[in-house]
Image (tube, coloured by chain):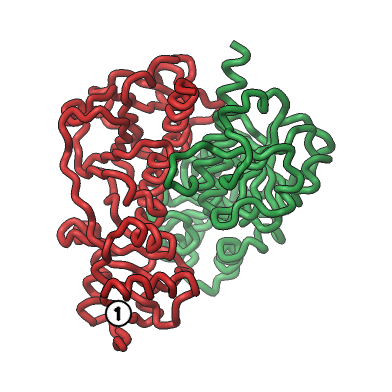
Chain colours: A green, B red
């Protein structure tokens, strides 16, 4: 039986708190925290062995409890954490009571890999990042890269919003846009609300692998990303309406790509 | 010169705080709070006269300051709020320092109106709600309805995520799914990850006005919504991936509709 960690001064708690508060620690330590039964289930199914389980003192729901047993059978150590302290770490208000410390897989940039890619340029919101990773994987785009100005892909919030998609994808962080052409044998398309061609009118862009480049909410794509783009496309939204949320824009572009690929082969 | 509101016990502050904390007060009072220069600009452009301006004591940025002057010219009263108190009300961490108290427009359900509609069934997250209102308006869908189980469409967080789209749309709250057929002369389509037809393979669904019904993140569409659907469609996502975020799913369905409408008329 593990003792309950009660104090904010506890060394383990302090270390976990650092991972939540500052993504630099995720990078430095190479680990992150994954909250929720859905993420735990994905981690289990992929055969990933967590470093540790963090259990909320108030208890686990039935689903989380079953997952706890399965990880215990794999000799994953666990730590019971005072509920108030657990809630400080958790990215959601009413979690399932089970959080996993997991290693962050490291990926090195490939050479001329002919695959579809989603490239995020300076996207700051961890929820948006996680949602876009989820959307990309659902659309069959399993390589996601981001510029150094993006928020960390592996923060507990981004991981939570990704709903397990992180573990089905290959993620590259700190990638300057000018390295994309060497890394991926794919055309680079700028999703740009300010101009370019109509996404739907150009009927040929999907015939090669595509790197879709999405900019930050406020600024859009940066200069480097725009300069390396083979083409710019805009989503034809109604007049009097400025732009889409970046997550919605990514869904529109990546699923238009998926639609074209699916209907072309059937 | 207005005095700075410094105390949490101030009656105005307490009233605003109630609007933020509990959406019932938004409904009861018929007002909400809109933070940010972008929302203020939209409100100005639409000729809406706010009830009051709330100004962060630390000051306004240049853009917000200009908006402040324009609303002042319309004799909108203003209140300076201690920065700490302002931040308690603000839905974002680093706001522009200008928040508007605005009336919530009320809409009554029409009779057999032949328009496209987005229907939200039990969507809880205010950010998702606001983003979907923004997406719908961008896709040309300007009527958005929601079940009683949805979070309030007009909460400061939903309003902020909507980026002004609320004021370009007609919003109906507390609408049971079984009233949709009377209100709108449109086919009702259930977006359902669990089954139905492939969204892309059925090439005829867009020829009449459409009510797209989207369910909550956890549960999907409720029984009533499913029972009134003329058809169910799923988005063909890759295998091994469960579902999309509801906001991404709405973007995919509504922009597939837009694509079909645009390419059919050109």
Which quadrant is the N terminus of chain B positioned in? bottom left
Q: Position of residue B75 (x, y in %)?
A: 26, 75
Residue in the image at 49% along x and 65% along y: A5
Residue in the image at 58% along x and 41% along y: A133
Q: Is residue A222 above or below residue B222?
A: below
Q: Position of residue A26 (x, y in %)?
A: 65, 58
Which quadrant of the structure image shows residue B156? bottom left
Q: Secondary structure at mark 1?
A: strand
Residue in the image at 36% along x and 58% along y: B45
Q: Is residue A164 left or right of residue A64?
A: right
Please state the chain letter of the residue tagged with numbered disc 1 in the rendered image: B
- Residue A184 visible in the snapshot: yes
Q: For mark 1, what is the residue? A: B79
Q: Is residue A22 above or below residue B226?
A: below
Residue in the image at 32% along x and 51% along y: B167
Q: Depth check: A75 or B151 in front?
A: B151
Q: Is residue A181 left or right of residue A247?
A: right
């Amino acid at each position: 039986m593990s003792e309950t960690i009660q104090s904010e001064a506890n060394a383990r708690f302090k270390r976990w708190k650092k991972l939540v508060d500052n993504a630099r620690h995720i990078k430095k330590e190479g680990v992150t925290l994954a909250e929720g039964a859905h993420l735990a289930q994905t981690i289990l199914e992929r055969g990933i062995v967590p470093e540790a389980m963090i259990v909320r003192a108030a208890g686990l729901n039935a689903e989380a409890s079953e997952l706890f047993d399965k990880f215990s059978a794999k000799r994953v150590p666990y730590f019971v954490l005072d509920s108030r302290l657990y809630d400080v770490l958790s990215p959601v208000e009413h979690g399932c009571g089970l959080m996993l410390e997991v290693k962050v897989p490291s990926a090195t940039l490939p050479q001329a890999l002919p695959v579809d890619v989603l490239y995020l340029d300076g996207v700051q919101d961890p929820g948006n990042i996680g949602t876009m990773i989820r959307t990309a994987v659902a659309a069959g785009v399993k390589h996601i890269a981001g510029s150094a100005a993006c928020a960390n892909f592996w923060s507990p919030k981004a991981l939570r919003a990704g709903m397990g998609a992180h573990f089905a994808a290959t993620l590259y962080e700190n990638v300057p846009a000018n390295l994309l052409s060497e890394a991926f044998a794919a055309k680079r398309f700028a999703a740009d609300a300010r101009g370019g061609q109509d996404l739907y009118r150009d009927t040929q862009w999907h015939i090669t692998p595509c790197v879709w480049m999405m900019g930050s909410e406020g600024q859009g794509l940066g200069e480097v990303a725009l300069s390396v783009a083979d083409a710019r496309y805009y989503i034809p939204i109604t007049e009097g309406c400025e732009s889409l949320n970046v997550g919605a824009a990514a869904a529109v572009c990546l699923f238009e790509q998926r639609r074209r690929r699916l209907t072309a082969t059937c």
